[in-house]
Amino acid sequence: MAQVWAVGTECIGKYNFPGSSPHDLPFKKGDRLVIVAPSKDPNWYKARREDGLEGMIPFNYVQEKVPVAGSAPQPPQRPVLSAPQPVADNDAAMNHASKGAVQLKTMPWFHGRISREDAEKLLTPPKNGRFLVRESQNYPGDYTLCVSYDGRVENYRVRRNEKGLVTVDDDEYFDNLIKLVEHYQKEADGLCTRLKAPVDKEGQHLFVVDVNDFKEKGWAIPKASLLKKSLIGKGEFGEVWLGDYEGKKVAMKSMKDHLKDEKAKTQFLAEASVMTTLRHPNLVCLIGISLDDNPIYLITEFMAKGSLIDYLRSRGRAVITKQNQIDFARDVVKGMVYLESQNFVHRDLAARNVLIAEDNVAKVSDFGLAKSSSNVKQEGAKLPVKWTAPEALRENKFSNKTDVWSFGVLLWEIYSYGRVPYPRVPVEDVANHVENGYRMESPDGCPDQIYKIMMDCWEKDPSQRPNFTRIEKALESVAVAMSSS
């Protein structure tokens, strides 16, 4: 977690910080600064230079001024060539939340794919105004609003038009099911009765993201402000383009066919929603989202050197040093310490989902599966078996300790220079092997202390695995030992 400094604390610049916003306070390595005030974001402070100028500074670019005598050895810090990129917004330097977090909204009354008969059973005994929503059996992609009234159940087809809006009567359209339900909870407006008492689904509830929230909270970017340059990535989800926004390089992530797949669109918007709540130098930063035309674009900071897995494989032992490896590991764990402190579970931590900036700083990305919960059950998604903890494969339950397991595999990727995990085990046999106690061997040339961290991450009992704060300290010890050897 970020160090907490009291107002009046004297700090020394560890690196040059040129700033990237009018609210930033530029300084050079060795400059003296005084903390003026904390911010809502623990990674940024308001500070004052010796010349009296005040502004925002990132905590990891400075260190507290302490007496030299008797100080403990510190792990080596690689030079940082550029500052972490605050969100491109006038108030961004104050804190990431200045734009406002976009929250996921749950739909407890949505029961998914159940039959008409099952819906009627759930609405028994009948009571006027009890209701639920289910997927339509006769019209794929549409929904059915089931309402109990006068001893029977009325079924209303909820259609979705070509723009993704939903309606009951072709007269009034709503952005999503939540808006529709909220409307009919206020008045019947043509229904048999006003919606009064939802019948909640047992287990995990579906969620929805209101696109208007991005606009209201300041995240919307007009498509006219973006310049799409070149394709830099492509996958099942869609494409990633190098773009330009207000003179800065950005990454533009799009989702293909988002109007044809409502669930995929919701997942895409959920990733953006998660990113509005998070800010850390070792997490890829959201700049905004372009909603005014199709396709929708997620705009993030541009990471010039691509994914960690491609970086490892394309450079290998001839280029990547031991220092690079420990730096990458420490960068990732710092990002994960922050996620853990925010009670977020990433659920897809792997070298493919870590990106490398121009200055070689590693940042965790791909928050499409991240959830704000200490113990999340995942339904309806394919799991990356070789990176997933045994209890998650067995029960579909995820926690920070399942992220710890995945970090152990990521560490193995770093020290094997990007090899595919479990190289001699067919993917269909991995889960069974792991359940029976099999663990990967140490990569060639991997330090014993690093392999011990991997093995600690792979404890079968989640309670026996370290948290990310402990892992961070263990990696710092390795870094200190490297610097003194």
Image (cartoon, rainbow, N blue to C red):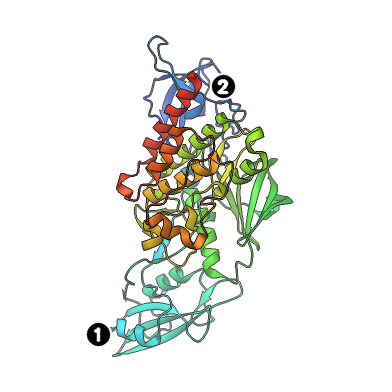
Where is residue 334 shown, x and y percent of the image? 46, 37
* Residue at (27, 84) in percent of width and height: 124
Marking on residue 27? 2
Residue 466 seen in render: yes
Towards the viewer: 233 or 103: 233
313 displayed left or right of 54: right
Amino acid tagged 1: Pro
Q: Mark 1 points at which residue?
A: 125
Q: In which quarter of the image is residue 131?
A: bottom left
Q: Look at the picture and state if 24 lies above or below 416.
A: above
Amino acid at the residue labelled 2: Phe
Picture coordinates of residue 126 (x, y %)?
27, 85
Q: Is residue 464 left or right of residue 305?
A: left
Q: How crowded is mark 2: few (under 14 residues within 10 Å), some or many (20 or more)?
A: many
User: Do tag 1 and tag 2 residues touch (Cβ < 8 Å)?
Assistant: no
Q: Position of residue 383 (x, y in %)?
A: 48, 60
Task: Label 2, secondary structure: give it.
Answer: loop
Residues 374 and 198: in front is 374
- For the N terminus, the image quarter is top left
> Which comes sooner in the sequence, label 1 or label 2?
2
* Residue pictured at 59% horizontal, 34% vertical: 21
Name the residue furthest right.
Answer: 229
